[in-house]
Image (spheres, rainbow, N blue to C red):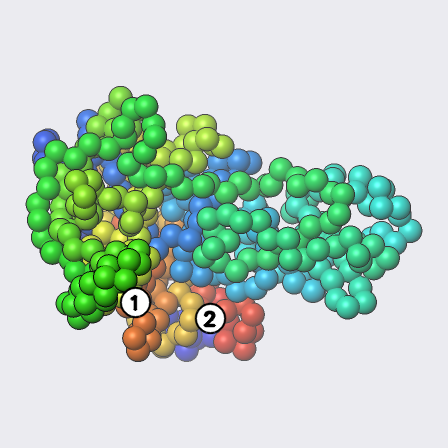
Amino acid sequence: MLSALALLLTTMTLTPTALASGAAPGAFPRLSDNTAGSATLEVRKVLHGSVDGMFVVPRNRQVVVAAGRYLWKFSDQGVLRDTLRVDGTLFMSGVMFEPDHFVDWVFTGSAQRKAYGAAVDGNALSHADVVVALQRADVVEFGKTDTTAWAYVWANGQAHKMDLTLHREQVDTHCHRSTHSSRSVRWLSACFEGLPPAPRAWTEVDPDSFAGFGDPDARVDVVKFDRRWYHLEEGLGGQLVGATAGMVLKAMGMPGSLPGRYWFGDAHTRLRVGAEVVQFKAFVPYEDGEYHFMHNMRWWEPAETLPGASPWFSVHPRGYLHHKGEAELLRHYEKDIGLYVVRPRSAADVPAAQRTVPPWRPVFEGPVTRYAAVTGKVEFAAAQPQASSAQAVTTLPAAHVWLRSPPSSPHVVDGPPPVPVDALWPALHQLPAALTVAWGLPSQEHDYTVLRVEL
């Protein structure tokens, strides 16, 4: 323990953090500058990388985002609270159910493996009685083998299994519902005949068109376009082949179209959010007289389920990165890729009266860790009154941070270049009193380590 403690203390460093300042009035900053806003709103990037899905947990007023094999838990105003690596059998209901334990972090905040309560025998119940019993739960999922079947039943942080072997034929473990996230993640979903889909303990947010096509009031207005890259679909070789093949098809009277060619550039974008307008540059194609935001931007509106929540939007890689010419194009907008929240100004700021030290954040520089991020929980010291004030300074709540990001995925030959997923971690503003560090995967107990150090 002493050697581990010494290692930890010598490998944790405090690094100064630059704070983003607002853009000048009337300016159109790039999204990656992280300075866009209006008099009352700010546009802030909270994740870098592609977003697989977004969910709302009404009971906690939280937004959970799936990205990069992690779940990211935010407040309804986009303040990052916690993360969890999806290292187990996660169901679309939000709970990891395994044969001998479950993890309900989405709803309780606990990443600990929990044991099931006493099993319930559902074989003595009629089909109708089973349906009635399962409808009382907050979350129900199912599993089966060639000879057995069971239900996972969760409510208020407790779970048990119900034996449904005699009802095995009513269990369907392949009833996947088509959603935005189901096309990106491989979470499980199961059904029971006669059991109506229950209101989920969390609700998926379906992304909308960023530009708001079809809306009576346009969400987006482009006032200027700076050309930056003339794009040839399929590259120069593909253009030559397409032109040759196109002439042959046309001569034969067969339908077809040539690979496209058009400008990409910075669209000076005015985004309307309520009565406010925020301005920034978005890298988009201009084709056939239109700005095509649809190819790499989406709009997320959790307020439909969670009234008062801020709106979000995402920038993602184009869907054909393996095509020729796309890797060169990616270089022009890779820094913009990620998740953004449009929230009230200062929603995530620490009040000046509670800032007792210059901004800093901890960094792990210890042994190489595979697969997972090195995470930390920083508990802050009780702050002393400032000399200029007789009032005591309120101690900030503990902060969850990544001390080191997971290793980057290797670039597969002839595959699309990987875009790593990471957060834009906020600066810390008080001295630490204790630090809990975790590295490795809980499923690999021989490599998983959790260490708490009081400073």
Rendered position, 131 above or below 411: above
Q: CA distance from mark 2 to mark 1?
A: 32 Å
Q: Tell me what residue is drawn at x 56 percent, y 70 percent.
A: 443
The type of residue carrying mark 2 is Gly
**Looking at the rendering, in which quadrant would you find the C terminus?**
bottom left
Residue 382 coordinates in the image, percent (x, y): 37, 45
Q: Tell me what residue is drawn at x 86 percent, y 57 percent.
A: 166
Specify the quadrant of the image occupied by residue 271.
top left
Residue 191 coordinates in the image, percent (x, y): 69, 50
Mark found first going from the N terminus, 2 or 1: 1
Relative horizontal placement of residue 110, taking residue 73 as reference (left or right): right
Residue 184 coordinates in the image, percent (x, y): 45, 57
Residue 83 appears in view: no
Q: Tell me what residue is drawn at x 44 percent, y 46 percent.
A: 54
Rendered position, 139 above or below 394: below
Residue nearer the viewer, 170 or 46? 170
* Circle 1 residue: 322
Element type where label 2 sits in the image: loop
* Circle 2 residue: 440
The type of residue carrying mark 1 is His
Rendered position, 28 above or below 103: above
Residue nearer the viewer, 105 or 50? 50
| Callout count | 2
Which mark, residue 377?
A: none
Element type where label 1 sits in the image: loop
Specify the quadrant of the image occupied by residue 272.
top left
Relative horizontal placement of residue 192, taking residue 295 as reference (left or right): right
Residue 265 coordinates in the image, percent (x, y): 13, 49
Relative horizontal placement of residue 48, taking residue 260 as reference (left or right): right
Residue nearer the viewer, 302 or 178? 178
Q: Nearer the viewer, mark 2 or mark 1?
A: 1
Residue 4 appears in view: yes
